[in-house]
Amino acid sequence: MHPEPHDELRVASFRDLDTTTLYEILKLRSEVFVVEQECAYLDPDGRDTEPGTRHVWFAQGKKVRAYLRILSDHGVERIGRVVTAPEARGAGLAGRLITEAITVIGNRPSVLDAQAHLAGFYGRFGYVVDGPEFLEDGIPHVPMARGAAQREPAG
């Protein structure tokens, strides 16, 4: 019997990504965000290559199964491009990625724009909605923040 393949956690800056891994990351993001969710936009937006950006993913061999990136935005870390391959969904990889992202971010404040139906998922990790719902590519989103990035309530 062959052992079950396991998902390996990896973290890298852009310059440390090999071309095969970069291709797999961009392919997964396009498969889900552009094709599956039918959002026509330029996914490689120039932010992947910034020195402060960290790429976090789970892979089995060369296959990227779940991914997110952390951008450094003037003292606030921004989690984005959270994606899981269709065949890997339900295995808890997205939650493990968010946990790792929080570890990478440390005690710095962080924000993300969650698809509105996933606000409860991110809430389990200490993120709170901190602004009004908005549409992005026809999909309802809510801004969320964790730590010092949270805005003080008005009043």
Image: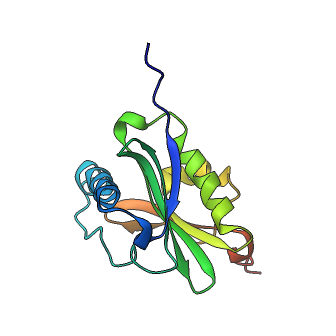
Image side of residue 48 versus residue 55, left or right: left
Q: Is residue 98 above or below residue 72?
A: above
Q: Position of residue 26 (x, y in %)?
A: 30, 59
Q: Residue farthest to the bottom?
A: 74
Q: Position of residue 30 (x, y in %)?
A: 27, 56
Which residue is nearer to you in this view: 104 or 85?
104
Q: Residue farthest to the top?
A: 1
Is residue 132 visible in this depiction of the protein?
Answer: no
Image side of residue 78 versus residue 115, left or right: right
Q: Is residue 96 above or below residue 19?
A: above
Task: Name the residue: 71% across, 67% down.
Answer: 106
Image side of residue 114 versus residue 103, left or right: left
**Number of numbered tags placed on the structure image:** 0
Q: Position of residue 6 (x, y in %)?
A: 50, 33
Task: Name the residue: 52% across, 42% down.
Answer: 93
Q: Position of residue 22 (x, y in %)?
A: 33, 61
Task: Name the residue: 59% across, 70% down.
Answer: 111
Which residue is nearer to you in this view: 103 or 98?
103
Quadrant location, the C terminus: bottom right
Q: Quadrant of residue 147?
A: bottom right
Is residue 67 visible in this depiction of the protein?
Answer: yes
Q: Is residue 71 above or below residue 59?
A: below
Q: Quadrant of residue 107?
A: bottom right
Task: Name the residue: 34% across, 56% down.
Answer: 21
Q: Is residue 41 above or below residue 84?
A: below
Which residue is nearer to you in this view: 123 or 105?
105
Quadrant location, the N terminus: top left
